[in-house]
Amino acid sequence: MGAIFSQGLERELAGVELLVFDEFHCTEPGDAMLMGKLVKYCREHGIRLVTTSNYEPEKLLDDDTFHHLVKPIIENIRLNFEVFELDNSLDYRLVDNGHSGERTGFRAGSLTLLPQEILASEQATWVEIGYDRIQATGVEDDTIWISFDQMCRTRRNTADYLELANRYSHWHISEIPSSDTMAMDEERRLANLIDVFYDKDVEVHLYAEDDLSGLGHMLHDTEKARLTSRLTQLKRSEHERTSASR
């Protein structure tokens, strides 16, 4: 694996003098090993590396079990990089931009405090994703109705979410459980899903047992703050049963 990655770096970075790496962070041990090779390769080959991150170097792979894997990278960064913190504590997503009249894309979505019933299985539609498939409640043009179980309690990853977000621009996700009791892996998948929807500016309507204020209790503080900020963009409704009921 290491040799293949090194060969890939040689191929992709041939002739590169400046590499800009956005979202410089890792959450898994494998990512940390690859990150270390990238930083080392750039230094050895005189490539200037500019990165952005939501985390200070010491928060890379912020997991007590695996944090030791990134300590050499952190030492390298502190020794050979200039680190700038750009934070004025203002969340621009919450600032009125003067376009409050028309809500489009992600901001056209909603969070309804009303779990919805799933269609009978014989009415459902199978959606192919990679070498797998998931069961949607319904699909119509660029709109998909699907349950939390299928999106966050199956073997889904961010790559799956990206592919599905490219297919469907309008989403209805039902039966989202209480955020206070959500399992860590489910919470992580839902957080990743919201990130994808926001970045792709996809319209999403969530139907949950609570207002998701407890979401993020298993996440890093920075991730939790970003997730909370994005969810505040959604219109709130407590008793409204919308046309998403199929």
Image (cartoon, rainbow, N blue to C red):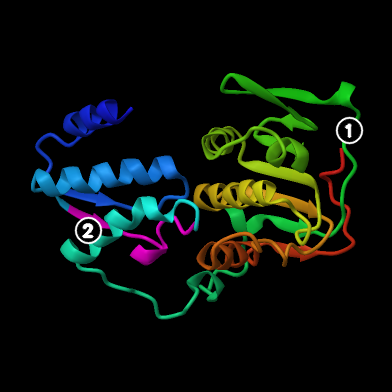
Which sits in the foreground, 11 or 139? 11
**Residue carrying label 1:** 119
Name the amino acid, label 1. Leu
- Percent x, y for residue 143? 69, 37
- Percent x, y for residue 113? 84, 60
- Considering the numbered disc 2 on the image, is that residue within a helix, a strand or a loop? helix
Q: Which quadrant is home to the C terminus?
A: top right
**Relative to 190, does residue 140 appear above or below in the rendering?**
above
Name the amino acid, label 2. Asn
Q: Looking at the rendering, which quadrant does residue 239 occupy?
A: bottom right
Which sits in the foreground, 77 or 94? 77
Q: Which residue sits at x=56%, y=22%?
A: 130
Q: Which quadrant is home to the N terminus?
A: top left
Chain part drawn in magenta? 49-63
Q: Which residue sits at x=23%, y=66%?
A: 78
Residue 147 appears in view = no
Q: Which residue sits at x=14%, y=49%?
A: 43
- Considering the numbered disc 1 on the image, is that residue within a helix, a strand or a loop? loop
Left/right placement of residue 47 relative to residue 207 reads left
**Residue carrying label 2:** 76
| 58 part of magenta stretch | yes
Instruction: Give neighbour class at mark 2: few <14, some 14-19, many 20+ (Cα, 10 Å).
Output: some
**Relative to 216, does residue 86 appear above or below in the rendering?**
below
Left/right placement of residue 46 relative to residue 203 reads left
- Percent x, y for residue 34? 32, 40
**Relative to 240, does residue 36 appear above or below in the rendering?**
above
Q: Looking at the rendering, which quadrant does residue 142 occupy?
A: top right
